């Protein structure tokens, strides 16, 4: 029997390695840009076509390579920074013209032009599927230009499994965002389909964050800075009053490399949680500088997950640093003793006679009588038909439940609702309580309003009949590059709701009109929340986009738990709720209504 184990050809071995390193076009962008950073470039241009499927080109003005180095960079296990095993644990660079290039060349067509300052001519190399097709001298400027064409052209199964252009483009921009945020002293220019979409000049760190994200972030960021024996921590966090309801901009970097770290995220949130409302998220851009030997960056193929030697100590330092920064900039809420409506505390005067407080009694008060029927207030019976109003609630009962009317016993097959009490009671400004024949009905006012608004907004979007209310003083909406792109995808639906937007350039939009029913709401926040919702739940199906936007707007404009409602407002809310197609649950599946039966109440009273 012949031997069955044999060495793989380099071309196949490189394709296998590419499956670990090159997952999508964004991986190519990351590897090439990091190589340019280690080459000492001060300007990096990134050219993208068809979301990286057709072309990914990175042009830098760093130190180029000799002809031999350029050829060696595409060989497996070739590197410029590792000479012995110990070097794996003290890496200061991203990777200089090596490691990932063989994997990239294995699944694409690659061209490289490179020239050193001391050389008179440069080197041109053309590689296709790991095979060198041409190498020659060429006249080119100092630096390196690498072009990656037709990614996965020789691995059709991988190419078919790439996501839509929108998704792949967003992943590329995410990788670029992580790189530019940690390299403010380098100029970045991004071209997409021959159009310049991003231009970030050399600047300070805070200005780089503002240029990339949005202009109004400048006044919302608080600087943190702490130097310890274990390492340095610096960066910026948002003020508690500027947190987001949707996905926030949250970044950790260690020694110039982006990382994910759930443990340190909890340290940040432990400071913010007492200061912000539930489901709100602060922006933060936090940079660690530690001894490379105290952090292991090789526990994940993409090096986005790392292990610190002193994680618990750094956790405490991080939380204390943020808490001190918030306190230093008066971001922590304080008691204002100088407020004009404060209660005046009288000064004790021993010579002044103190008068005993007077007690007013009502001799006709009877605690066992109903004060609502004493003439001061008497609710009126609703003018609409409760039986018809609550039919939908009965019809939406689960089919597996017993055929029992939730509002009372059925007689002679009659499915209508009877003996419904006229009064509504407001419990803790959150729930509407009302009596039904079989017990007590409880309605969550916030969730009920979400369901009402959701169906209303969804109808407006589909029919394009949102009523716009012109605003006297237009507001400005400043967005990041990624947010501008997402807005273009949902702009038609946004306008259908009643928003009137005018692009004034520079990633800024003027809000000239808002939906009539949300005239007093924060319009920029509402639009930004819909953009974030779309970014968090990407979908190419138009119906899903419309439902997502309607739910996002409903969540942000519904009456809140804790708002006092009058009897008339409660009646209107309940009336509108049971006119909905699905009054039992919110669009995301949360219960709106529950009924406590008479039997259950009786058991609790025993």
Image: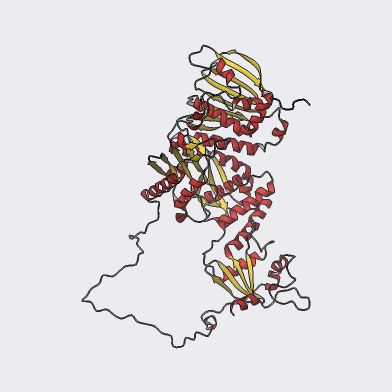
The picture places residue 212, in percent across and down from the top left corner, at 50, 37
Q: Which residue sits at x=74%, y=27%?
A: 4
Left-right relation of 530 to 419: left
The picture places residue 569, in percent across and down from the top left corner, at 57, 68
Quadrant including the C terminus: bottom right
Residue 600 occupies which quadrant of the picture? bottom right
Taking the view exactly as shown, the residue that stands out farthest to the front is: 1
Name the one closer to the observer, 47 or 215.
47
Taking the view exactly as shown, the residue that stands out farthest to the bottom is: 363
Q: Is residue 289 above or below residue 64?
A: below
Q: Which residue sits at x=65%, y=36%?
A: 165
Q: Is residue 178 above or below residue 576?
A: above
Q: How many marks?
A: 0
Q: Which residue sits at x=68%, y=46%?
A: 542
Asked if residue 47 shows in the view, the reply is yes
The picture places residue 245, in percent across and down from the top left corner, at 53, 51
Name the one closer to the observer, 293 or 353.
293
Taking the view exactly as shown, the residue that stands out farthest to the left is: 351
Q: Is residue 65 above or below residue 415?
A: above
Quadrant including the N terminus: top right
Name the one closer to the observer, 53 or 432.
53
Asked if residue 150 shows in the view, the reply is no
Q: Which residue sits at x=66%, y=45%?
A: 539
Name the one closer to the observer, 540 or 311.
311
The picture places residue 603, in percent across and down from the top left corner, at 62, 77
Residue 407 occupies which quadrant of the picture? bottom right
Q: How is the image coloured?
A: secondary structure
């Amino acid at each position: 029997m012949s031997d069955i184990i044999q060495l793989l050809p380099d071309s196949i071995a490189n394709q296998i390695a590419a499956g670990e390193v090159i997952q999508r076009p964004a991986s190519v962008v990351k590897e090439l840009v990091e190589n340019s950073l280690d080459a000492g470039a001060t300007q990096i241009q990134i050219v993208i076509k068809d979301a990286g499927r057709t072309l990914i080109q990175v042009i830098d003005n760093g130190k180029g390579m000799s002809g031999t180095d350029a050829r060696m960079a595409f060989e497996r296990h070739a590197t410029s920074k590792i000479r012995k095993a110990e070097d794996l644990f003290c890496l200061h660079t991203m990777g200089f013209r090596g490691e990932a290039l063989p994997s990239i060349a294995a699944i694409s067509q690659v061209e490289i032009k490179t020239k050193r300052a001391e050389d008179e001519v440069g080197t041109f190399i053309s590689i296709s599927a790991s095979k060198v097709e041409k190498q020659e001298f060429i006249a080119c400027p100092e630096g390196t230009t690498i072009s990656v064409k037709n990614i996965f052209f020789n691995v059709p199964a991988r190419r078919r499994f790439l996501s839509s252009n929108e998704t792949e483009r967003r992943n590329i921009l995410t990788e670029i965002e992580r790189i530019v945020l940690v390299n403010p002293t380098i100029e970045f220019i991004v071209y997409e389909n021959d159009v310049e979409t991003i231009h970030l000049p050399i600047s300070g760190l805070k200005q780089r964050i503002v240029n990339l994200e949005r202009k109004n972030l400048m006044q919302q960021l608080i600087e943190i800075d702490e130097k310890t024996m274990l390492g340095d921590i610096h960066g910026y966090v948002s003020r508690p009053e500027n947190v987001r309801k949707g996905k926030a901009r949250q970044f950790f970097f260690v020694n110039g490399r982006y990382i994910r770290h759930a443990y340190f995220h909890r340290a940040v949130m432990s400071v913010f949680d007492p200061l912000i409302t539930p489901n709100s998220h602060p922006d933060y851009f936090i940079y660690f500088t530690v001894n490379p030997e105290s952090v292991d960056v090789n526990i994940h193929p993409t090096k986005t997950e790392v292990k610190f030697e002193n994680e618990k100590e750094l956790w405490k330092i991080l939380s204390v640093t943020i808490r001190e920064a918030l306190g230093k900039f008066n971001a922590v809420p304080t008691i204002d003793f100088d407020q004009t409506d404060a209660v005046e505390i009288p000064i004790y005067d021993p010579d002044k006679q103190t008068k005993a407080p007077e007690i007013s009694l009502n001799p006709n008060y009877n605690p066992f009588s109903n004060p609502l029927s004493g003439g001061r207030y008497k609710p009126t019976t609703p003018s609409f038909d409760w039986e018809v109003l609550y039919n939908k609630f009965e019809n939406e009962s689960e089919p597996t439940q017993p055929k029992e009317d939730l509002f009372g016993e059925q007689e002679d097959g009659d499915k209508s609702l009877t003996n419904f009490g006229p009064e509504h009671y407001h419990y803790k400004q959150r729930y509407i309580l009302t009596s039904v024949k079989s017990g007590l009905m409880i309605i969550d006012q916030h969730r009920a309003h979400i369901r009402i608004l959701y169906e209303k907004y969804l109808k407006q979007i589909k029919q394009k009949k949102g009523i716009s209310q012109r605003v006297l003083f237009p507001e400005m909406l400043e967005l990041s590059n990624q947010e501008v792109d997402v807005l273009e995808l949902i702009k038609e639906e946004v306008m259908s709701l009643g928003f009137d937007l005018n692009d004034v350039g520079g990633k800024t939009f003027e809000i000239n009109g808002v939906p009539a029913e949300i005239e007093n709401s924060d319009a920029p926040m509402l639009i930004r929340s819909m953009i974030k919702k779309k970014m968090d739940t990407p979908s190419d199906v138009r119906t899903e986009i419309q439902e997502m936007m309607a739910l996002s707007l409903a969540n942000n404009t519904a009456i809140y738990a804790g708002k006092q409602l009058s009897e008339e407002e409660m009646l209107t809310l309940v009336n509108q709720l049971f006119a909905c197609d699905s009054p039992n649950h919110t669009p995301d599946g949360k219960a709106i209504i529950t009924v406590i039966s008479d039997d259950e109440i009786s058991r609790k009273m025993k």
